[in-house]
Amino acid sequence: MISRRQALTDGAAAITAGSFLLSGIQQAQAAQPATATPAQSITDQQPMPPAQPGKDYTPVVTPNGVSLPFKIVDGVKVFHLIAEEVDHEFAPGLRAKCWGYNGRTSGPTIEAVEGDHVRIYVTNRLPEPTSVHWHGILLPNGMDGLTGLTQKAIPPGETFKYEFTLRQHGTHMYHPHFDEMTQMGLGMMGAFIIHPRNPKTRPDRDFAIMLSEWRIDPGTSRPNPLEMIEFNVLTMNSKAFPATAPLVVKLGDRVKVRFMNLGAMDHHPIHLHGMNFKVTEINGGDVPEAGQSLGNTILVAVGETRAFEFIADAPGDWAMHCHMTHHVMNQMGHNSQNMVGVKSAKLDKKMESLLPAYMTMGDTGMGGMSDMAMPMPENSIPMSGGKGPFGVIDMGGMFTIVKIRKDLPTYEDPGWYDHPKGTVASTATTNDLNRDNIEIPKSGN
């Protein structure tokens, strides 16, 4: 039972956090173009000449992903999405039959510029109907993509056409609005990035990361879209560390990182090591400079988008990850017994007569489990981590690395950072301890 003190404390914290978030959202909304007046409806607005990547905007980088190709026909940007089953690898050792777009999950990033007129064909190769909702995008009601309300469902084998003029910029998403729990739970989602037509500044590096969650029981070959609570695979662009691609930038680059959350249940506090950033977007709306909060952790709630920017002023390999501790572990079971502190020597000795390879796990903590060569169920990666320059990186799930280097010839992965001499934490010597008069007390155990 929650005590009155706890209820009051939690309530006050929620009010404070809610007030801060509401303030940021109001500032972001204020920065967006005013709602169209009856004299100029959405359908009346005239498109502008189609903008070109590289020339008119810095193309987005989708780590582990791609941007959706387009062609220009009579001044219209034409895209084609294909909804279909996908054989997807989350990380080495874990594959599953998912659903996605154009052979991948997350689907390819759709990228355009405000004022562009877009025409998007959607072909359905799924065994059931589908649709596409353009999440957060201002458009005519009949293009909103909610089956039964604004359109008929797209039957299997059919192709539908969506067409509208982009009258805003910002970080947005697309996903089905038919059988959402199944289709989104199996991976149908993607980023829809709209660049400003005349930006005051342009980032040197612009990254898009979709956050999502899955239930994949060890040994199975398909995510369970009916799961509501106990998700065990947490991903960035449908990849779990160590399969997440690093974000490579040059020293001094202006960097923008966009996050989108189309998971079912969980919010994600994304933490960046080594630098502070400014929150520049909330739900696709620009945050005015006066309202840009400074921080190193940003909360990305379900169904929302956020973006932050920073100057890459500190070389190194800097972690970026969700700060919910169970979101940086791969296929961790929620029903595992707590063995920390258990004296297992006698139990292990008795069990060895029946199971020679038996060993109690977790009695001294779970660290290092990912470095142990133990047989695992087929097609599973429980608690697996990745190799780093100093041993195993004992994390998984929503974890990636921002790699900042000086004088990079390209943005290819430069490998591990070469630390200047004397800048790496190391074992303290006896001379170190004596010099600083540090006395190590004897253990009480």
Image (cartoon, rainbow, N blue to C red):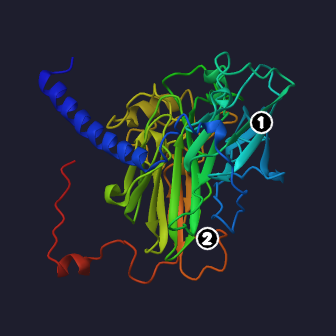
Q: Residue 422 carries which label?
A: none
* Residue 180 on image: x %, y %: 62, 23
Q: Which mark is residue 415?
A: 2
Residue at far front of view: 39
- Residue located 79% across and 53% down the image: 75
Front residue of 145/87: it is: 145
Give the CA distance from mark 2 to mark 1. 30 Å
Upstream in sequence: badge 2 or badge 1:
1
Compared to 175, does 405 lie above or below?
below
Q: Which amino acid does label 2 sit on?
A: Gly
Compared to 217, does 244 lie above or below?
below
Compared to 55, does 155 lie above or below?
above
Discs 2/1, front: 1
Q: What residue type is labelled 1?
A: Val
Disc 1 is placed on an element classified as strand
According to the picture, the residue beneath numbered tag 1 turns out to be: 86
Front residue of 404/70: it is: 70
